[in-house]
Image: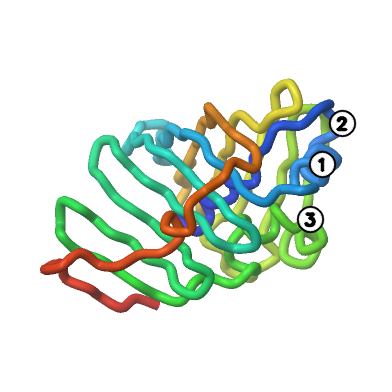
Amino acid sequence: MIMDWLAVVLLAVSASSAPEDGRAQLDAFAEGLDTLSGRFEQVTIDGSGRITEESSGALYFSRPDRFRWSYDEPFPQEIVADGEQLWHYDVSLEQVTVRPQPSASESPLLVLTRPELLDRFYRVTASEPGLIEFESLADNPEIEVGRLYFAGGRPERLELEDSFGQLTRLSLSALERNPTLSADLFSFEPPEGVDVLEGY
């Protein structure tokens, strides 16, 4: 599910200095990361280069494996991982989908916030100033290639290429490292009257 892979941007944190290559920066970013908040802009581009989707919102992360994506434009949605289940609430459809939260092997959020798992599930194909590129080791991965770009010691853009030739690009802003976040951000109770569907 693309939403799980998008969670990789939640590893983004500020650093006091910028190590030389992407892998070193990634290791530095994961060091001491407990919570994170920020804003994102998301664009999906098809194989012909046409923009098929644009959205924006806020992101939140809490170690070890909880996160929340709040989409406010163009269609309000909430995606919440509470450590056990992944909830997706589409406000306009009045529909909630819930399924078991993906393991580390399926979600770069857990791998890239825990660098010791990176080599177990991914192959780093490039690590140079301003960039780390990686590929899934799975036989039939949904996301084939990921690239995380840095600027001034801070992640600024994530690109994910999927098996359908689509590119998802996220631009990051207003990132705050280790803010105080309410536990309520990482729990979800379906609103009264909405349809709740179980997914796998």
Q: Secondary structure at mark 2?
A: loop
**For this view, does 149 lie left or right of residue 76?**
right
Q: Secondary structure at mark 1?
A: helix
The x, y position of residue 42, in whole percent, is 42, 36
Identify which residue, 54 or 82, lies in the foreground: 82
Whether residue 45 is visible here, answered yes or no, is no
| Label 1–label 2 contact, CB within 8 A | yes
- Identify the residue at image location x=59%, y=41%: 179
Q: CA distance from mark 1 to mark 3?
A: 10 Å
**Circle 3: residue type:** Pro
Q: How is the image coloured?
A: rainbow
Please state the total of marks drawn on the protein image. 3
**Circle 2: residue type:** Pro
| Label 1–label 3 contact, CB within 8 A | no
Precedes in sequence: disc 3 or disc 2 = 2
The residue to which callout 3 is attached is 115
The x, y position of residue 182, in whole percent, is 48, 52
Q: Secondary structure at mark 3?
A: helix
Q: Quadrant of residue 106?
A: bottom right
Identify which residue, 69 or 148, lies in the foreground: 69
Q: Which mark is residue 158?
A: none
- Identify the residue at image location x=45%, y=73%: 85
The residue to which callout 1 is attached is 28
Q: Which mark is residue 19?
A: 2
- Identify the residue at image location x=86%, y=40%: 24
